[in-house]
Amino acid sequence: MRACPAHRSIGRDGHDHPPCDRRRGIVAPEFDAELTAQVRHELSDVLRSWRTKFPGVEVHEQTVIGGEGSNLVDASRDAALVVVGRRTRHAQFGTHIGPVTHAVLHHATAPVAVVPHD
């Protein structure tokens, strides 16, 4: 999902366009397969060390193109628990969460655990 801004394409109108709009999940067709493969590879790289450290934990990888919040809400339909993170920030007025965590908290059908991290 985060790979979208790394690519650009020239549209038929001659203007430079991003191949996807992350908020709406729109991907230019010529980038769809490439982007999915790139994201799948990055996900496998990230999970490799965790699989080694915790071999008893079963992991199912899934890559989807689109908005993070809406994709996690969709995935919550088949989940027993959704775990999302939030950065630890020292705010003047309480804890702040980002738009993805906000969407999941308000719309997920499964229980949600919010885990603070640096």
Image (cartoon, helix red, strand yellow):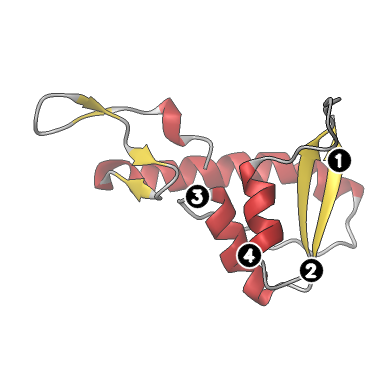
In this view of the protein, can residue 70 be seen by the observer?
yes
Mark 3 burial class by Cα count in 10 Å: few <14, some 14-19, many 20+: some
Residue designated by label 1: 116
Mark 2: which amino acid?
Answer: Pro
Q: Which mark is residue 67?
A: 3
Q: Which mark is residue 86?
A: none
Q: Rounded to the nearest whole Å, what is the CA distance between mark 1 and mark 3?
A: 21 Å
**Dot 4 or dot 3, earlier in sequence:** 3
In this view of the protein, can residue 62 be seen by the observer?
no
Regarding mark 4 in the picture, which secondary structure is present there?
Answer: helix
Q: At 90% from the left edge and 53% from the top edge, which residue is drawn? A: 54
Q: Rounded to the nearest whole Å, what is the CA distance between mark 3 and mark 2?
A: 20 Å
Depth check, mark 4 against mark 1: the one in front is 4
Regarding mark 1 in the picture, which secondary structure is present there?
Answer: strand
Mark 4 burial class by Cα count in 10 Å: few <14, some 14-19, many 20+: some
**Mark 4 near mark 1, Cβ–Cβ under 8 Å?**
no
Mark 1: which amino acid?
Answer: Pro
Horizontal and vertical percent for residue 9? 25, 29
